[in-house]
């Protein structure tokens, strides 16, 4: 484990055209057992009322809420801008989820515990949203995640000598990192999704201090899987492109 870091924690949520869904994410963050954090929503120049929903939530939220607009398109741009803004505002610890995800109540507490115990980065566990999927669909999602994790460990590009830590399944919508490590590794690639694997490999080339927490759980939307199907979703995650499909199905 690395150096113990204690300091302000910020949660960053990138959002684009999420007016119909982001309130449930915000409510899940308000229901955390640990609300000693600043919430930053980065609106990626939405064309709908996403910002209005955030402002309405902020009026009664149990934590400070800030709203930032990032006009450069791409989730990587929104996340990088948000993290660097948080760092410039004094954040020592950073966590991220997405505007269509539901962090379970112990999510922030688990992220903080891992980082203050000395981890440079912590990756949590992802599962399918229970309000969108029945037991069979959730089981199918779990299988897909397990297959992706196994493929990632076996992929030759992830096993080079330049890596200081073994490959672990990393979902960008369920991760936390120290501000120091974020800057030292070069940050999130400023590009459209998918960005997670590139970012993880930047971190792996910088430190071995990466851990996982099974109790750091985020429920994911499965709308991309439903929109693309299994094969085209796999191609998209492997940077093979989405063909004529948008990278942000809604």
Image (tube, grey):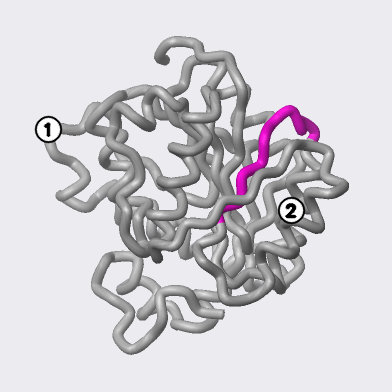
Extreme residue toward the bottom, this view = 244
Q: Toward which corner of the image does residue 213 lie, by quadrant?
A: top right
What residue do we see at 22% from left, 32% from top? 205
Q: Toward which corner of the image does residue 179 lie, by quadrant?
A: top left
Q: Is residue 77 above or below residue 113?
A: below
Quadrant where the image shows the N terminus:
top left
Give the side of residue 50 with respect to residue 60, left or right: left
Alpha carbon of mark 2 to alpha carbon of mark 1: how far?
41 Å
Query: Is residue 133 in view?
Result: no
184 part of magenta stretch: no
The segment highlighted magenta reads 33-42
User: Which circle's residue, 2 or 1, is located before the other in the chain?
Assistant: 2
34 part of magenta stretch: yes
Extreme residue toward the right, this view = 60
What residue do we see at 66% from left, 41% from top? 39
In the picture, the disc for residue 63 is: none
Residues at marks 2 and 1 touching, judged by CB atoms closer than 8 Å: no
**Closer to us: 42 or 148:** 42
- The residue wearing badge 1 is 161
Where in the figure is residue 11, as x and y percent of width and height?
61, 40
Q: Secondary structure at mark 1?
A: loop
- The residue wearing badge 2 is 26
Give the side of residue 243 with respect to residue 6, left or right: left
Q: Is residue 94 above or below residue 149?
A: above
What residue do we see at 30% from left, 50% from top? 189
| Camera-nearest label, 2 or 1 | 2
């Amino acid at each position: 484990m690395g150096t113990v870091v204690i300091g302000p924690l910020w949660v960053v949520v990138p959002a684009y055209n999420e007016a119909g869904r982001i309130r449930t994410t915000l409510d899940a963050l308000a229901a955390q057992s640990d609300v000693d954090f600043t919430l930053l929503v980065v609106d990626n120049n939405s064309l709908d009322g996403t910002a209005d929903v955030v402002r309405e939530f902020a009026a009664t939220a149990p934590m400070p809420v800030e709203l930032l607009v990032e006009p450069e398109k791409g989730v990587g741009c929104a996340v990088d801008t948000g993290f660097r803004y948080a760092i410039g505002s004094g954040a020592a610890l950073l966590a991220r989820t997405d505007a269509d995800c539901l962090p379970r109540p112990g999510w922030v507490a688990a992220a903080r515990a891992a980082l203050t115990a000395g981890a440079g980065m912590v990756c949590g566990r992802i599962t399918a949203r229970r309000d969108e999927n029945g037991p069979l669909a959730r089981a199918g999602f779990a299988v897909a995640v397990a297959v992706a994790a196994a493929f990632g460990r076996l992929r030759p590009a992830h096993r080079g000598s330049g890596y200081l830590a073994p490959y672990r399944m990393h979902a960008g919508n369920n991760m936390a990192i120290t501000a120091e490590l974020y800057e030292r590794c070069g940050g999130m690639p400023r590009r459209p999704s998918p960005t997670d694997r590139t970012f993880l490999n930047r971190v792996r080339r910088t430190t071995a201090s990466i851990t996982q927490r099974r109790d750091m759980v985020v429920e994911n939307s499965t709308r991309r899987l439903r929109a693309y199907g299994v094969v085209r979703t796999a191609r998209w995650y492997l940077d093979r492109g989405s063909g004529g499909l948008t990278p942000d199905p809604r």
